[in-house]
Image: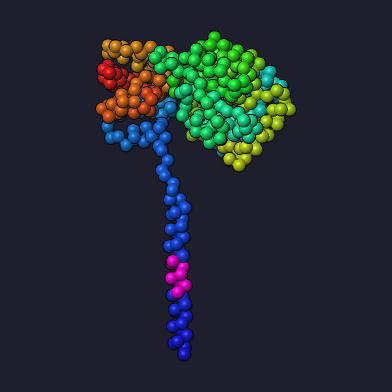
Amino acid sequence: MAMSSSRSAAAIRGRRVGALARARRHATRAMASLFGHVEPAPKDPILGVTEAFLADPSPDKVNVGVGAYRDDNGKPVVLECVREAERRIAGNLNMEYLPMGGSIKMIEESLKLAYGEDSDFIKDKRIAAVQALSGTGACRLFADFQRRFLPNSQIYIPTPTWSNHHNIWRDAQVPQRTFTYYHPESRGLDFAGLMDDIKNAPNGSFFLLHACAHNPTGVDPTEEQWREISYQFKIKNHFPFFDMAYQGFASGDPERDAKAIRIFLEDGHQIGCAQSYAKNMGLYGQRAGCLSILCEDEMQAVSVKSQLQQIARPMYSNPPVHGALVVSIILNDPELKSLWLKEVKGMADRIIGMRKALRENLEGLGSPLSWDHITNQIGMFCYSGITPEQVDRLTNEYHIYMTRNGRISMAGVTTGNVAYLANAIHEVTKTK
């Protein structure tokens, strides 16, 4: 009898084990089918260039694809002002949460950079500003703000622009339109087309503008053209949102690089502005930035800032502290700020020098093409005019990596590779 009970219990356990195994197999199949329709995402066109470069064993390979500064030996750079700021942080400051709006000190210094040291807008507390996850995060916060409080609006984005701009406003579900910017034949600005599109856009439209060093073209309006753009914006009551990713890095002078914004402020516009410290302080991985919106008065600024913080809360709760500390220490200390201004000018001057060297090398090789645009453009990138097919040849035959739109990151050009790069470009462009 006992043996019979034992067999019965064993059978019951066996059935349970079998049932559990079947349930697990069923659950596994169900989960597989739940996500079975998910396809691999397309590779990022910029980051994919670096992946291909790293996989290439050639000793001659050159990466002029990704927009991160390198010294003349092709090595990443940490600025001395950043090193000193980090020495002051180490062991002396805590790593508690920042408020949802971020570091007050960093925001204050960022506003001085963008709006001017003695700006009345700052004194009158008319600017709603929050720390953001670099320029990308600042753009995304604004796009979500636009969607939430102006749901019937759309954004006009220049053709071309940094590819992530389209992703940001798309994912924020803000309808997009484009406006004319680049003139392929001249490798310069299509000012007439740009002005026509501004005039023809519905009154009160939102426009995304690059404050300086337009990415990817390196083509900026002149001061006089900016004044005409501002005037037309005033007539049409358009709202300008400036993405300022390269202040100081473009010309070497942060004041000069903020000129477009200052023109719009002088003309009485309300504006939005995204700032980033990735390029001009080399804080790429620290994700340090600022979003600001100029409002009608202090009361409106308080309301707008509170809503920006509410949008940030479910996204990331509060921004990272380390980069904010670095920025605020540098900009709040006269000696460190002076060192930063010297170092950012050094970075800008090296890139300007590489533009000159690349153009001179191409002309020295007897290229039948005009390369004036290399030195006419400004900032991190040169929109070379090289075709996708020619880019493929550069990669396959010369191990030179860049995006297929022909955008050259001048930060990747050095005295050691500029002649090789110029020769390769000459070889693939000398015949059609």
State the image coordinates of residue 30 (x, y, percent, origin top left). 46, 57
State the image coordinates of residue 360 (x, y, percent, origin top left). 33, 12
Q: Is residue 185 magenta?
A: no
Side of 252 where 428 appears, left or right: left
Side of 210 where 394 appears, left or right: left
| Quadrant in the rendering for residue 89 | top right
Q: Is residue 278 above or below residue 189?
A: below
| Quadrant in the rendering for residue 169 | top right
Q: Nearer the viewer, residue 414 or 221?
A: 221
Q: Nearer the viewer, residue 362 or 26?
A: 26
Q: Residue at x 46, y 65 (%)?
A: 23
Q: Residue at x 44, y 59 (%)?
A: 28
State the image coordinates of residue 405 (x, y, percent, origin top left). 38, 25
Q: Is residue 129 above or below residue 431?
A: below
State the image coordinates of residue 322 (x, y, percent, origin top left). 55, 35
Side of 262 where 60 appears, left or right: left
- Report whether residue 79 is seen: no
- Toward the right, the furthest residue is 299
For the magenta stretch, what is the residue range?
A: 15-22
Q: Residue at x 62, y 22 (%)?
A: 204
Q: Is residue 19 magenta?
A: yes
Magenta: main secondary structure equals helix
Q: Residue at x 34, y 34 (%)?
A: 52
Q: Nearer the viewer, residue 174 or 310?
A: 174
Tell me the quarter of the image containing the C terminus. top left
- Toward the top, the furthest residue is 224
